[in-house]
Amino acid sequence: GAVVSQHPSRVICKSGTSVKIECRSLDFQATTMFWYRQFPKQSLMLMATSNEGSKATYEQGVEKDKFLINHASLTLSTLTVTSAHPEDSSFYICSARGTGRASKTGAFFGQGTRLTVV
Amino acid sequence: AQSVTQLDSQVPVFEEAPVELRCNYSSSVSVYLFWYVQYPNQGLQLLLKYLSGSTLVESINGFEAEFNKSQTSFHLRKPSVHISDTAEYFCAVSDGSSNTGKLIFGQGTTLQVKP
């Protein structure tokens, strides 16, 4: 089946630094990618939707200047957490959607990235 | 707007017993419905989904869910659980009319299977 790879799986960074998370579709072209955030013991909340070659659409309450999303190619989207603070510590998960069999809603998630800001 | 409510935050059950994880949704448009399983510190795995057609959908590992439009529910069931089924389960809904692909998740249910 279609595979979505997310990297890194875990990252620890110092407060004030920036962290980049990558989400790759390995065997299909991801026309749309979704970024979710999950706090401990809580559900997933959609942060933003990115379509290849265009600006991301952010959900209400998500700071677009803090969470920079780039979807420059059909196989790669990145989420950069800028000037990270401890409250940004969370589990970030991407989901990718493409064409054909990869167009099935909700099917393909990355493994997630555990971000800890110290 | 759509929303999902998972009525139970934790469900403890003994091995080989049946289990039902409840999910109700709210939507003014047609919906796609999903169940995902998440093991600790891992991403989501799609368990099963309802897009259209038969209201009873099944997974390869014995889970099933039934779409009930009148009750706006999509409860997940398994007749006999295993220790390995211990995980977090999320119900999710997506807009079936616009098919944007955006998912709204429920709060999650922790299934604890005891020996």
Image (tube, grey):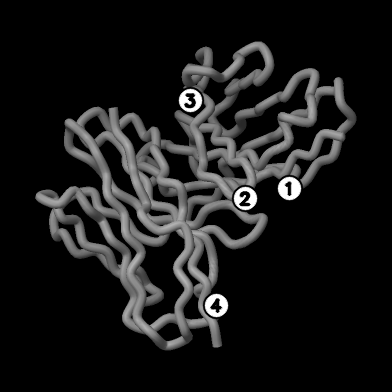
Q: In x, y percent, where is residue B36?
A: 44, 56
Q: Which numbered marker is on residue A111?
A: 2
Whether labels 2 and 3 belong to a single chain: the reply is yes
Query: Which dot, 2 or 4, sits closer to the camera?
Result: 4
Q: Mark 3 and mark 4: span between their CA atoms?
A: 33 Å
What residue is shown with label 4? B84
Q: Which numbered marker is on residue A9?
A: 1
Label 3: element kind:
strand
Q: Mark 2 and mark 4: span between their CA atoms?
A: 19 Å
Relative to A29, B57 lies left or right: left
Chain ID for label 4? B
Instruction: State how many labels appear.
Output: 4
* Amino acid type at image mark 1: Ser
Q: Mark 3 and mark 1: span between their CA atoms?
A: 21 Å
Quarter-of-image position of residue B38: bottom right
In the depicted structure, whether residue A102 falls above or below residue A77: below
Asked if the residues shown at circle 2 and circle 4 are in contact, with their CB atoms under 8 angstroms apart, the answer is no
Q: Tell which of A59 and A50 is nearer to you.
A: A59
Q: In x, y percent, where is residue A84?
A: 78, 24
Residue lying at 48% horizontally and 68% vertically, measured from the top left: B111
Asked if the residues shown at circle 4 and circle 1 are in contact, with their CB atoms under 8 angstroms apart, the answer is no
Quarter-of-image position of residue B84: bottom right
* Amino acid type at image mark 2: Gln
In the depicted structure, whether residue B62 falls above or below residue B98: below
- Please report whichever mark, 2 or 1, sits nearer to the chain's N-terminal start: 1
What residue is shown with label 3? A49
- Please report whichever mark, 3 or 1, sits nearer to the chain's N-terminal start: 1
Whether labels 2 and 4 belong to a single chain: the reply is no
Whether labels 3 and 1 belong to a single chain: the reply is yes
Quadrant that contains the C terminus of chain B? bottom right
